Structure formats: C-alpha cells, structure tokens
Image (spheres, helix red, strand yellow):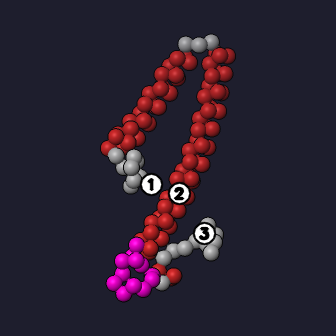
Amino acid sequence: MFRYPPFNSPTFHQFAATSLSVVDHAEEEVHHALKNLPEHVATTFRGLASGIKMDQHSQRIDSDARWEAMGGRLDELTGLLHMLVGGKSSKSGSKTKKGDFYFRRDIYPA
C-alpha cells in the first residue's frame, strides 16, 4: 500500500516521521501535568490513560493485520491484471496458462 498515493508522497512520509514525536511529546506533557494533581485524581487519570493505550495498541494490531491482508489482495489483483494485460497483448494471441499466476480459491471461488 505504501507504494501508492497518497502513502508514497513526501508529505505523508514527513507526517509519519513526525507523528510519533508529537504523540510522545503530548504524553510527556500529560505526565508532568499529573504530577501537580492530588494523588487520587492522578491515579484515576493514569488508569484511564492506561486503558486508552491498551485500546489503541489493540486497534493498531487489528489495523496492521487489515493492511497486510489488503496488501496481499492488492498483489493478487495486480497479478491478475498483469495476466489479463499480458494475455491480450501477446503476439501469438494465446492466453496465459492458469498455472502462471497465483489464484486463491478461498477468496475468489470459480
């Protein structure tokens, strides 16, 4: 996916590179702010922050798995497209053999 727009643009790469430092800076500011609160309030906020972090981590894992699945499907579609374009542009007019490409029957049944 990162080979295609908008994910391959310099603007996106700059955003991705700076986003982690922005999040780290925000977490550091919250940590310092919590030091000035009464202990029971600070403990409540720490618990909430921990819960949010765990939820975000879980969402990142799910998102990564979905990106990986989409990348695999994109590769499959790219292969099929190359097969179709290659089959139509061949000089002999013969079609590409079925065994020349990867076809997942569990996703695309015949």
**What residue is disc 3 on?**
108
- Give the vertical position of 109 relative to 67 (above or below): below
Pair 2/3: label in front: 3
Q: CA distance from mark 2 to mark 3?
A: 14 Å
Q: Is residue 67 visible?
A: yes
Q: Secondary structure at mark 3?
A: loop
Residue lying at the far left of the rendered structure: 10
**Label 3: few (<14), some or many (≥20) within 10 Å?**
few
Labelled pair 1, 3 in contact (Cβ < 8 Å): no
**What residue is disc 2 on?**
70
Residue 1 numbered mark, or none: 1
Identified at 38% across, 55% down, the residue is 3
Q: Residue type at mark 1?
A: Met
Pair 1/3: label in front: 3
Depth check: give the residue in front, 86 or 46. 86
Image quarter (top left, top right, bottom left or bottom right) of the C terminus: bottom right
Labelled pair 1, 2 in contact (Cβ < 8 Å): yes
Identified at 65% across, 16% down, the residue is 41
Q: Is residue 17 visible?
A: no
Q: CA distance from mark 1 to mark 3?
A: 21 Å
Identified at 61% across, 32% down, the residue is 52
Q: Residue type at mark 3?
A: Tyr
